[in-house]
Image (tube, rainbow, N blue to C red):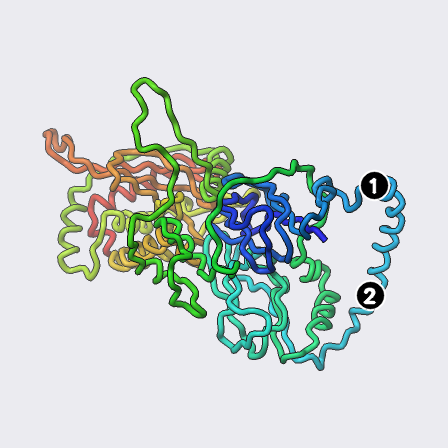
Amino acid sequence: MAEIIRMPKMSDTMEEGVIAAWLKKVGDSVKPGDILAEVETDKATMELESYDEGVLLYIGVKEKDAVPVNGVIAVIGEKGEDYQHLLDGGDAPSEDKKKEEEPKAEEKKAEPAKSEAPAEKIDVSNINATVITMPKMSDTMQEGTIASWLKKVGDDVKSGEIIAEVETDKATMELESYDDGTLLYIGVEAGDSVPVDGVIAVIGEKGADFETLLKAQKSESSGAPAEEKVAPAKEEAPKTEAKSTGSSAPSATAEGDRLKASPLAKKMAEDKGIDIRTLNGSGEGGRVVKRDVENFVPAAAPQGGDAVGTAAPAVGVESFKEEKVSQMRKVIAKRLAESKFGAPHFYLTMEINMDKAIEARKSMNEIAPVKISFNDMVIKAAAAALRQHPKVNSSWLGDKIRYNDHIHIGMAVAVEEGLLVPVIRFADSLSLSQISTQAKSLGGKAKNKELQPKDWEGNTFTISNLGMFGIDEFTAIINPPDACILAVGGIKETVIVKDGEMKIGNLMKVTLSCDHRVVDGSVGSAFLITLKSLLEDPVRILV
């Protein structure tokens, strides 16, 4: 029987996905576990697996097109099977037949409620198996997406072994088993999301009655059973024109086998223009991992890229190229728009004489274990100023204002796909060398997409520095939930007036963006005055 394939929710912030590439075409045979397509979300490109066996009868989304979560992507069924009634939103072609079956359908809906009631009394004390549920991997996590399964049903599992990779909206984390036994059941397909505490799998003795265990689990929960998450949705879908797609797609792995590669390796390969299917994996079971991509030496120029002509356009001829917006860029746009138009911004700009800071940095780097940057000095000075002005270190919560006692400074880092903000925790208690070490480590993780939830959560104040790009002055949009963000420009040698004389000095402009619901002009100004005094006499930030 034909089944509709819908766009799964692959992260807790995902609202739509983009079909990056189809790995199957209409008419191809498909087996459970085969990769149908690559889907671009707001944070990564992930694989869409088939749950069913059959023939790919219909593709409803072209490559590079976006489709909302739960939108129709494709139909799989038997060769030659009529599937149009599924796209039309019904299970039968006749309206009269539908009317006749409606009373029966209502009766059938009532029956399971009666039969499920006794499930509360199911005895599972003799079943040697354990239900594995989705753990809460961060304080903001509401659901997780199974990026890939590293074990399959029937495999032996030992305590401490990694059974799956779970993806949140910003990172991929490993899911360990805490039990020994056999993987008896998998309740969530790779690419699907499951809420925290939702059923993922069952581990136990070989042959254990896990179905009874799942029924007992269902009877104890008011939510939907895990089995419902495995089956493709069958609810009504909007009518869609059946179109035959002639677009070419990358060839799948031999015999339709699943490509074994970590999500990070896939992303790195995509960024480098490497066909990951050509790499030999050094991970478990031949799995391609990060080091395989890093160590890859191409034999020839990599294929791929945008199909643009090599010849320059003729003089006087207008031309342009359009690229679809990435999911990460969409999320950035949405969050910044909410901040800009939701929080009343105002801006305070101040010049800081960096002459003494330049001399101090030179002296410190002669003995420091790591090279200290001007950005490290700004972070340290801002943290010290926040300690003196706690009203700046705050958040608007609607009906109350939170004044944070701890100081966690977010550090904006530009990556190819957009902007990430890793957090330096308790920055006021760290030395300049410690700040430098953490800043370099977090910046590297951000660029390699290796940040974990603890690395990006909890900021109370943010700094964005474009001085190294030659920018003299700019304003930044507040990074929620902070009340302020500091925009730092470059150090510029210029003529200044000091003691009635013109001299050469090194000035740096900073602009504080403030949420006027929380921070008033006098409060923001006092903070900047303190920041200025600390950077113009850097010895004070070392005390």
Amino acid type shown at disc 2: Ala
From this view, report whether residue 384 is shown above or below residue 343: below
Q: Residue at x 14, y 30 (%)?
A: 495
Question: Can you identify the residue that label 2 sits on?
Answer: 117
Question: Can you identify the residue that label 1 sits on?
Answer: 94
Q: Quadrant of residue 323?
A: top left
The circle drawn on residue 277 is: none
- Answer with left or right where residue 406 lies relative to residue 433: right
Q: Residue at x 42, y 49 (%)?
A: 460
Task: Name the residue nearer the viewer: 32 or 54.
Answer: 54
Tell me if label 2 and label 1 are in contact, CB under 8 Å: no
- Answer with left or right where residue 443 lies relative to residue 402: left
In this rendering, which labeled residue sits more in front, label 2 or label 1? 1
Cα distance, mark 2 to mark 1?
35 Å
Q: Quadrant of residue 368?
A: bottom left
Say whether disc 2 or disc 1 marks the residue closer to the N-terminus: 1
Local secondary structure at mark 1: loop
Amino acid type shown at disc 1: Ser
Q: Residues within 10 Å of mark 2 (few under 14, many from 20)?
A: few
From this view, report whether residue 433 is shown above or below residue 177: above
Q: Residue at x 32, y 17 (%)?
A: 316
Residue 418 drawn at (x, y percent):
40, 43
Task: Name the residue nearer the viewer: 396 or 319.
Answer: 319
Q: Residue at x 62, y 57 (%)?
A: 51
